Image (spheres, helix red, strand yellow):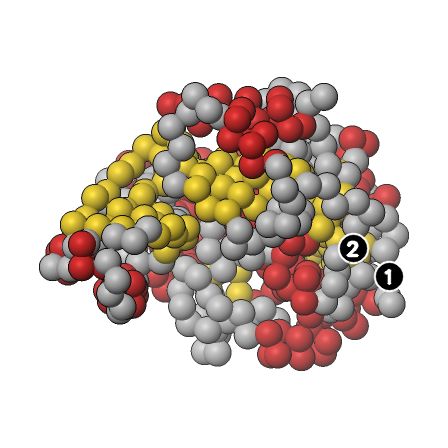
Amino acid sequence: MSNFNVAKFGGTSVANFEAMSRCAAIIESNPNTKLVVSSACSGVTNLLVELANGVQDQARRSQILQQLADIHDSILNQLKEPSEAANQVYGILDTVTSLAEAASIQASTKLTDHLVACGELMSTHILTQLMKERGINATRFDIRDVLKTDSTFGKGEPELETIAGLAQQSLVPLCNEFVVVTQGFIGSDEEGNTTTLGRGGSDYSAALIAEAVQASGLEIWTDVPGIYTTDPRIAPKASPIPEISFSEASEMANFGAKILHPSTLVPALRHDIPVFVGSSKEPEKGGTWIRHKVGSSPLFRALALRCNQTMVTLRSAKMFHAYGFLAKVFEILAKHKVSVDLITTSEISVSLTLDQTDTAGGAPQLPEAARLELEELCTVEVEHNLCLVALIGNNMSESKGYAKQVFGTLEDFNLRMICYGASPHNLCFLVHESVSKLAIQKLHKELFEE
Ligand code: ASP
Ligand code: MG
């Protein structure tokens, strides 16, 4: 196996000169790191998204453009020889200015991708120069030449074979000579239009690139020192997990532990590439290794909390002893492109939660048209302000006795929907938002704090 390591740095890791310098030190500390994938500087993508949505007010537009210039200038100003990187960044800012104007007249998803990609295009110019000034033999590479996707703007679907072919052709040889710095999040379609993988997509990019170059390791550097037994802001006694399996980690990502983009582990798993997650602010604290095989597989590994859940309950007496009801329900949901997350059924009712498909945040909505169509079939009840608590572990569907421990701890809570048994790696349920943190605290104390 090669010793080829890919290191990815998130937005907060490249937020300013000091942060970028810490990244450079991390890169220097591992001579096997041949490829660096970077996000846009912290806050930049949000500003670009605002512009892409179409800002009519000229004054606000100039204000955003100024903010973008300031963020990058503050780093450029601390470089020894900023001129080349500065020229590149200013050139990109000119593009941003004209695209923002176009978006204020008519926004489109294609225009949005072109615009939001500029964040990563700028940060990588600066990071490359900073690395060079520290004596690293760095070069910048435009990943759009390799990371090919379909033309679904805003959520491009990567074309794996093409990516692998192009990476072997142009990226791998370059990495043999340089430490290559490239962009996360962005790609291009067959016609060369810029696409993106969706918000937070640079983890996913890094994993796709690691897969394409057949890397032996992928480091994801972010602002938290790895994966914890639960969010330490909720339960201060939460402890770091040094090593976790791919299955456990993907359950955690899916269930809202906001450490990794949920798709990240898919390519890593396909090629069995170990993934490290750590904090670029405190690299000495270590982090979490996500691997195929791990030393221990405890029954309880972690607790995740995901709020903004929408629960839909459908009831129909017709469902009793009838067939085809669920098929009909899912046909309607599919027709209206409603993606379902969890589901439980009883003889005459079915409860489901809606998947978070957009990037806007907030609770997912049941489209009115879908609701009307469902109401021809059954009664429809929609509830908000719910949170999903997921207990992640191993062999949960085969172990006896622990349900008593879990539900005993929560006997004073009104648990809404309980999903258990479908996956050996999780048990999850819904609780009202107002008590969700308390539920996590109680469970964490019972299951994870001796
Ligand atoms: N810069 C992009 C975003 O903020 C991608 C990423 O950071 O993962 O969504
Ligand atoms: Mg990010």
Q: Which residue is mark 1?
A: 3
Q: Return the residue nearer the eye: 142 or 63.
A: 142
| Ligand 1 within 8 angstroms of badge 2 C-beta | no
Place of residue 412 in the rendered image (x, y in percent of width and height, measured from the top left): 43, 21
Quarter of the picture containing the N terminus is bottom right
Q: Which residue is mark 2?
A: 293
Check the image and report above or below for 303 versus 133. above
Furthest residue to the front? 321
Does the image show residue 446? yes
Check the image and report above or below for 288 versus 160. above
Residue at 62%, 37% in the rendered image: 401
Residue flagged by tag 2: what amino acid is it?
Lys
Q: Earlier in the sequence, mark 2 or mark 1?
A: 1
Q: Residues within 10 Å of mark 2 (few under 14, many from 20)?
A: few
- On screen, residue 291 versus residue 112, left or right, reads right
The quarter of the picture where residue 443 lies is: top right
- On screen, residue 36 versus residue 314, left or right, reads right
Instruction: Describe the element under mark 1 as helix, strand or loop.
Output: loop
Quarter of the picture containing the C terminus is top right
The quarter of the picture where residue 247 lies is: bottom right
- On screen, residue 397 versus residue 387, left or right, reads right
Residue at 56%, 32% in the rendered image: 404
Check the image and report above or below for 449 versus 163. above
Total numbered badges shown on the rendered structure = 2
The quarter of the picture where residue 181 lies is: bottom right
Place of residue 131 in the rendered image (x, y in percent of width and height, measured from the top left): 76, 47
